[in-house]
Image (cartoon, rainbow, N blue to C red):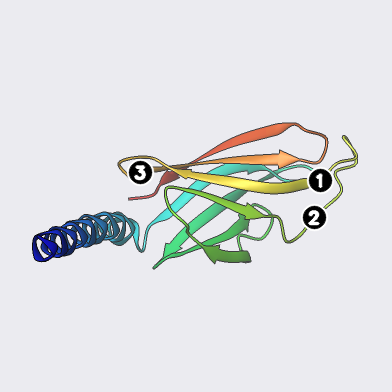
Amino acid sequence: MKKLIMLAMVLGLLVLLTISASVVSAGDDWLRKIDGRRYTNIAPKYGGGTMTAILDVIGNVLVFGYISSDDGKYSEIERFEIQGRETRHQNQHPFLFPACKCWVDYYIYTFSEDGDIITTRAHYSDGTVQESVYFWQR
């Protein structure tokens, strides 16, 4: 009887490991699918004008940058690890916005099921939330 119980436990463990591996594989497949993609959003620039905000996916890293409408040059702001379809990132460059006397505490990046859109939600220190949508540039 003890041997049957041990066998059942081993088989149960093997089933759990198989399920766990397939979940990890599905996550890896999704990340591989979007690797190398660039997502853009036209955003207002502080002080007037616009800029093209950019999110690049490089492996499991999301790179945030922008192209200024003034000189057309690309500037990288920061990069951080993608932690799944929804990734929270603490703002590393707090900047006080004079209009609201607030700053962005953190961002939440949400990847669409098909991987074509990234929606960002900026959570400000005064409790407001601003949403932006980035589209994959094919």
In what element is the residue under mark 3?
Answer: loop
Residue hosting label 2: 94
Residue 48 position (above or below residue 31): above
Whichever of labels 1 and 3 marks the residue nearer the N terminus, that label is 1
Q: Is 74 placed left or right of 124 in the picture? A: left
Residue hosting label 3: 116
Q: Where is residue 63 in the image (x, y as percent from the top left)?
A: 53, 63
Q: Which amino acid does label 3 sit on?
A: Asp
Do labels 1 and 3 touch, CB within 8 Å? no
Query: Dot 1: few (<14), some (14–19), or many (≥20) neighbours within 10 Å?
Result: some
Do labels 2 and 1 touch, CB within 8 Å? yes
Q: Distance between the residues labelled 3 and 2?
A: 29 Å
Residue hosting label 1: 103
Q: How far apart are marks 2 and 1 (CA)?
A: 6 Å
Q: Residue at x 60, y 57 (%)?
A: 67
Q: Is 23 placed left or right of 91 in the picture? A: left
Query: Dot 2: few (<14), some (14–19), or many (≥20) neighbours within 10 Å?
Result: few
Residue 47 position (above or below residue 38): above
Whichever of labels 3 and 2 marks the residue nearer the N terminus, that label is 2
Q: Which of marks 1 and 3 is in front?
A: 1
Q: Position of residue 33 (x, y in %)?
A: 28, 57
Q: Which residue is drawn at 32% across and 50% down?
A: 138
Q: Residue at x 58, y 45 (%)?
A: 108
Q: What residue type is labelled 2?
A: Pro
| Residue at the outermost front position | 1
